[in-house]
Image: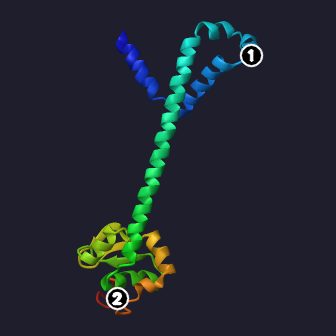
Amino acid sequence: MSGDYAKTLLEALKLAPRYLVSLSVIAAFFLFGSGKWLKGLGVDEFAKHYRQWIALTFIITSTLFAADRCIAICGWIRYKVLVGKFTKRRLERLHSLTEDEKQILRFYISQQTKTNVLRYDDGVVQGLESAGVIRRSSTLGTLMEGFAYNITDFAWNYLNEHHELLLGTTNTYRTDKRPDFPGLFPGLF
């Protein structure tokens, strides 16, 4: 019997916030509503007889709703802090690019494209990917030619505003895409 009460209590704790607010408002109406309103609805005797349970319902639902909102706000703040830290790390990374990394990123900016074909087994490519500057956009590719990598929106916007970050010892850019050779296989193209 007491197991049923515990199960019911646990189910009540899982209620969505909108139900908690509804229960709290109803309980508040029974507790704080004017006698005239309660009498008019025919619930004045109910409100008097079960006042302690209605008050308990009001306290519990209000507390659970407040706790739910606090958890949501803390989660939002934590998310914003993490996004800020991640953004700061990516900015620091973009401000400390090596020449090889600049060559890869110059391709995106100079060609005004968000996709480049790069070798998957290249450490420079993997470094840019792990830093969140580029990401592999396709699982289809070859080890010889490479895979499609997209520049992230953050890096795209920032590098288009700050071209000076791509200045280096060379002015070349890099793509691992092999040129098409239409004359190599006559009749196929």
Residue 94 left/right relative to 26: left
Q: Between residues 30 and 42, which one lies in front from this camera angle?
A: 30
Q: Is residue 175 visible?
A: yes
> In which image quadrant can residue 87 be found?
bottom left
Q: Can the viewer see residue 151?
A: no
Quadrant placement of the C terminus = bottom left
Label 2 sits on residue: 182
Which residue sits at x=59%, y=27%? 22
Residues packed near mark 2 inside 10 Å, few (<14), some (14 to 19) or many (20 plus): few
Q: Could you give the CA–CA distance between mark 1 and mark 2, rounded to whole angstroms?
A: 87 Å
Residue drawn at (28%, 72%) of the image? 126
- Residue 97 point in image, percent of width and height: 35, 80
Whole-percent x, y for residue 75 in the image: 45, 47
Choose between 115 and 153: the one closer to the eye: 153
Query: SS of the residue at dot 2?
Result: loop
Residue at 24 percent of width and 78 percent of height: 144
Amino acid under disc 2: Pro
Q: Amino acid at mark 1?
A: Trp
Q: Which mark is residue 47?
A: none
Closer to us: mark 1 or mark 2? 1
User: x, y percentage for residue 109?
Assistant: 45, 82
Where on the picture, by quarter, is residue 133?
bottom left
Name the secondary structure under disc 1. helix
Compared to residue 153, the image places residue 59 above or below, namely above
Upstream in sequence: badge 1 or badge 2: 1
* Residue located beneath label 1 in the image: 37
